[in-house]
Amino acid sequence: MTTSTGATAEFFPTLTPTNDRIALQSGDQTWTYAALHQRVNQLASGLLAARADLQEERVAFFMPASLDYVTTLLGVWRAGGIAVPLNVAAAIPELDHALSCAGVTRLLVSNADDPALTDLKALCQLLQIQLISLAEVLNSVGESATTKLPALTPERRAMILFTSGTTNKPKGVVSTHKNIRAQITTLLKAWAWQPDDAIPLFLPLHHIHGIINVLCCGLWMGARVSLFAKFDMEAILDQVAARKYTVFMAVPTIYVKLIQHLESLDDTRRHAFCAGFRAMRLNISGSAACPVKLYQQWQALTGQTLLERYGMTEIGMGLSNPYHGERRAGAVGIPLPGVDAKLFDDNGDIIAEAGTPGEIRIRGDNVFLEYWNNPSATAESFVDGWFRTGDVAVREDGYYRIMGRSSVDIIKSGGYKLSALEIEGTLLDHEKISECAVIGIEDETWGEAVTAFVVLKPGQELTKPELKSWCESRMSPYKIPKQLRLVAALPRNAMGKVMKPELRKI
């Protein structure tokens, strides 16, 4: 990086003109770190044009996992801008909110002439945002660009990601270069990343899981990242069977789909795929709670003990089961290196006793700077330097177990505080249930009545009395669902999280 007076943020030490290791792969195409370094600097120079520094200009991009996406993310950072990755599956009103909230000035796409972008073009015209093809910016300077690039201090804003919006309007989460570096380097150490690692990237790239945990960790370490525009099960499994990957990261819904597919195959094919997973050094599950049943099914099929961790847009990753040591089903582990985590009660006091529920609060360099242009929400989210996650957990032998999000997963029924996630985990053991979600519905008698929304396996039927009878030997009476709603599917966001506010509308 260009140096100047004062500290500068380290910028992907593997991106050098002489690094001929493979950085990215897409199908049969590969790109070295040297080629990526040249392309990133070329884009940064094109974005700068005659300017010396983008000075935290918000530059958005609308692209799936691809060479163009990686070039744009790193190029915006390298030019001193704030990267705003957009959800390629978002509806126009959602994109309108993100672009307007962040005050975006330019929006990069792979091909501005793509007819599928007609509505997005119209939105950009309305918002007076310049929509540009990536190639246009690259060609404006040529491959031999030598523009001097700005120094990046750790405190500078680097990225705005939007919260999932499961409980309210999505907020723009601002991370600095220091935050991003802390999030990356913590995971490199905790999960023992190695330069010889190879990982598939098929997760949405408007979310911290795909951006930091997979892409940035892989590139910072010098590993190989295989890019998929979407989850292509057949192509990914072929690579798994060929032993092309050493690390695999996915959300629980992906593991569910993989298990269902693997169990439908003949013995020879299933063995080949399962052996490919077994040969990897690490399989990770995150972004939503991993049911114990799923954890056990994956272990039985592949021999892999899933590593579950806990994080969110505002903090990156905060807790994790250990890479070396005991991984506990149903637990999200212990605080990561450099991360302070405590449980707090309703009075704001630290909870010292094991087994007592409390809100998780986090401190560390990994914690975001602010919500963009929303000082009141920022102030409400911090108490004495601790970020309030809104998630409730208990600590057992040092390991944290998530009970749920206080606003949607903690049900206050009959004087008890119940964990919706715990009840869901039990219901998933029912032989007729494929998926379920539990919420509390306002009730005069109970305060909130435990209500289960259930997706049945094909050809199955289930009645409320039948479910009640089954539950009686498996959970306390006050946890048994008072209402049963059978649905064809659960509403989920791009990361597989159930949107429980949508269930309330039903």
Image: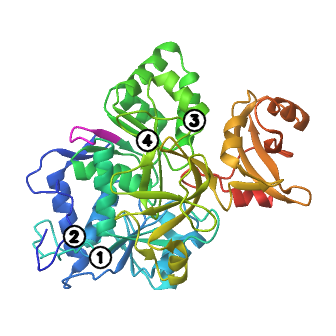
Report the colour scheme.
rainbow
Q: Whole-Å distance between the Cαs marked 3 and 1?
A: 40 Å
Residue 486 visible in the current orientation: no
Instruction: Identify which amino acid the numbered label 1 is placed on.
Output: Arg
Residue 4's spot in the image, x, y percent?
Answer: 11, 78
Instruction: Identify which amino acid the numbered label 2 is placed on.
Output: Asn
Residue 24 visible in the current orientation: yes
Say whether residue 174 is left or right of residue 138: right
| N-term-proximal mark, 2 vs 4 | 2
Residue 293's spot in the image, x, y percent?
Answer: 61, 31
Q: Which mark is residue 59?
A: none
| N-term-proximal mark, 4 vs 1 | 1
Picture layout, residue 145 above or below residue 246: below
Instruction: Identify which amino acid the numbered label 4 is placed on.
Output: Asn
Q: Name the residue under label 1.
A: 156
Q: Mark 2 points at which residue?
A: 139
Q: Whole-Å distance between the Cαs marked 2 and 1?
A: 28 Å
What residue is at 45 percent from the left and 30 percent from the top? Answer: 305
Residue 379's spot in the image, x, y percent?
Answer: 51, 79
Residue 148's spot in the image, x, y percent?
Answer: 12, 76
Q: Mark 4 points at which residue?
A: 321
Say whether residue 14 is left or right of residue 332: left
Q: Are marks 2 and 3 in contact (CB under 8 Å)?
A: no
- Secondary structure of residue under mark 1: loop
Q: Which of 219 and 130 is in front in this view?
A: 219
Q: Whole-Å distance between the Cαs marked 3 and 4?
A: 21 Å
Q: Name the residue under label 3.
A: 256
